[in-house]
Image: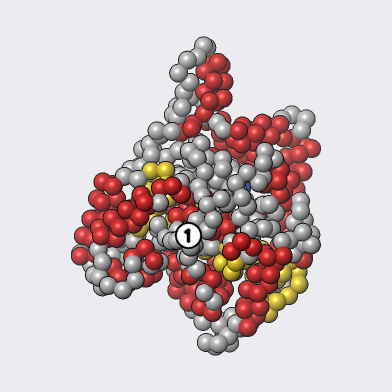
Amino acid sequence: MSAPLHTLGVAALSRLLAVGQVSSVELSRELLARAREQAALGAFLAIDESVTQAQAEAADARRARGQATALTGVPVAHKDIFVPRDWPSTAGSRMLAGYQSPFDATVVARLGPAGAGMVTLGKLNCDEFAMGSANENSAFGPVLNPWDRSRVPGGSSGGSAASVAARLLPAATGTDTGGSIRQPASFTGITGIKPTYGVCSRYGMVAFASSLDQAGPLARSAEDCALLLSAMSGFDERDATSAEQVPQDYHAAMLAPRVGSSAARPLQGLRIGLPEEFFPAALADDVNGAVRAALAVLEQLGATLVDVSLPRTELSIPVYYIIAPAEASSNLGRFDGVKFGHRAAQHGDLLDMYKKTRSQGFGLEAKRRIMIGTYVLSHGYYDAYYLQAQKLRRMIADDFQACFQHCDVIAGPVAPTVAWEFGRMGDDPLQAYLADIFTLPASLAGLPGMSVPAGSGDHGMPVGLQLIGNYFTEATLLQTAHALQQATDFHTRVPPGF
Ligand code: GLN
């Protein structure tokens, strides 16, 4: 046998499984052993060999019956925001420690044994309720960046990104409310896509900010992301905001040649817009350099670069940090110690039980957001903050539509810097909020966004190129990223020692 199994991505493993060169049981056993060896990264929150083994056996049996999909038997793990029936779910919070869902999240069901047949290796660490940009807000400890253990892996899908980057998994699920798929993908040198709001069902995702939350895959290539996205997306009547679209084969769509293209110029005719606000003077030189170099490759591949403007880019920070906490304060109201989750052991009357439960169960960042959210929604402040934010959100979405008059895809950095060192943000949450500047606009507009490896910056740390498309143009983003990955090797680079 040639390449070790952990070095292979989804498409490559799918081919090996199809020809019977490896069984799912062997594959999952080997990757689980690797996950255990690398436990110090902090990526996994739950592993259960017996559940994995049963799923792998079922996948092998399904292949033997000739009923396999491309993903049957390929290992995956889920961000702890998704609730599977067979695994505990914490959402990175003490509030949900020990909680086990009675049902499968739609994304989990569609990827798992009842759907595509992927084999679950476990649950992945994340910021508490997906609030954060560094995975430092998890109640169960941080996740280390495999490129440099003194640096953060990004967040909130830090466990998903670190485990894929460290070759513990070929792919993982994540969620993105304001950048939580794109930014950790960028910080760890992997590929991630947040589809258009509504493409993946939110049913069974622990809610943070419901008008923004969106699931998506993190993997090592655009091709692998396309394979997962095709399986996990699609209309779901159990999510009231699910998009009523017919099932898409993103992989086939991504590979379909563009009109007028050639092998040398696969992106012929593609107009890529560069918003001037995404390249401010404050953008780190190393990030700017890597992003510009990747754009030059896209140009060689046939794309045309055009200047566009997203004038309210800066406003997306205050707008997001009003709307997201407002929705969070409402969503987290359900954790009251009565129905499920943590309940204070010692308490007085009902009000005292609520107070103690919530004081003990929530971490600092969750409490901060509950307070901000409650404040901006309160009588007297609603008009001044929440309503204004909603109006600006609409204008931010309109700005994108003005850009898409001139381009098909918008490109820029994912984050203003490479992954920072633990503790560098200190106790100042504002610093971390500001670093979300390039991911928040697409989230507020509900547009699809992607992070694609674009080489390395300072300290050898990965830099991601962000691609943003118009609604439901995931296939165009994936095609653009795929063309880049056919022409460059950024996405194949492995953290030293892995
Ligand atoms: N960093 C942003 C926040 O803290 C985004 C998180 C996310 O996308 N879940 O809210």
Residue at the location (35% across, 49% down)?
Answer: 36
**Residue labelled with disc 1:** 165
Residue 264: percent from left, percent from top? 55, 87
Q: Depth check: 279 or 285 in front?
A: 285
Residue lying farthest to the top in this orientation: 348
Q: Nearer the viewer, residue 337 or 494?
A: 494
Image color mode: secondary structure
Q: Is residue 126 visible?
A: yes
Q: Position of residue 309 (x, y in %)?
A: 77, 65
Q: Quadrant of the C terminus?
A: bottom left
Figure quadrant of residue 378: top right
- Work out whether residue 42 or residue 343 is closer to the camera in this orientation and state it: 42
**391 vs 332: above or below:** below
The amino acid pointed to by label 1 is Ala
Give the secondary structure at mark 1. Answer: helix
Query: Number of callouts in the render?
Result: 1
Front-lying residue, 101 or 203: 101
Is residue 201 among what the camera can see? no
Residue ID at (39%, 66%): 7
Residue 55: image location, x then y, percent: 27, 52
* Whether residue 296 is situated above or below residue 226 in the rendered picture: below
265 w.r.t. 209: above or below = below
Mark 1 within 8 Å of ligand 1, using the beta carbon? no
Would you place residue 33 above or below residue 380 in this image? below
Q: Residues within 10 Å of mark 1 (few under 14, many from 20)?
A: many
Q: In screen coordinates, is 454 left or right of 320?
A: left
State which quarter of the image contains the N terminus.
bottom left
